[in-house]
Amino acid sequence: MRGFARDQPVNTVVETTRATLTGGPVGSVAWHAVLWSLGIIAASVAASGVLFNRRG
């Protein structure tokens, strides 16, 4: 459970946003946020494609 809590996408996006707004160093957290976002988008596109084909 700790591993999931440590590496969930919300933490990386919040840390990146906070660092950007406060002028702090973003570091590699920004890449983690981008990768999580792209992964979520890819999974959503795949799921919507499967569900759309199921309707027709």
Image (cartoon, rainbow, N blue to C red):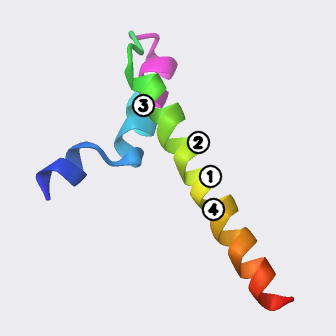
Q: Are marks 1 and 2 in contact (CB under 8 Å)?
A: yes
Real-space CA distance between mark 4 and mark 1, rounded to the nearest whole angstrom: 5 Å
User: CA gap, disc 1 to disc 2?
Assistant: 6 Å
The image's mark for residue 32 is 3
* Marked residue nearer the N-terminal end (3 or 2): 3
In this view, 26 is above or below 16: above
- The x, y position of residue 43, in whole percent, is 58, 58
Contact flag, marks 4 and 1 (Cβ < 8 Å): yes
- Report the span colored magenta: 16-24
Badge number at residue 38: 2
Residue drawn at (64%, 70%), measured in percent from left and top?
47
Indicate which disc, 1 or 3, sits on the residue closer to the N terminus. 3
What's the CA distance linking mark 1 and mark 3? 15 Å
Residue 45 on image: x %, y % = 69, 60
Residue in view at x 22 percent, y 44 percent: 6
Task: Say whether residue 7 is left or right of residue 27.
Answer: left
Q: Which labelled disc corresponds to residue 44?
A: 4
Upstream in the sequence, badge 4 or badge 2? 2
Identify which residue, 4 or 19, lies in the foreground: 4
The disc at residue 42 is 1
Label 3 residue SS: helix
Contact? badges 3 and 2 (CB < 8 Å):
no
- The crowd level at tag 3 (other Cα within 10 Å; few <14, some 14-19, many 20+) is some
Disc 2 crowd, CA 10 A, few/some/many (<14, 14-19, 20+): few
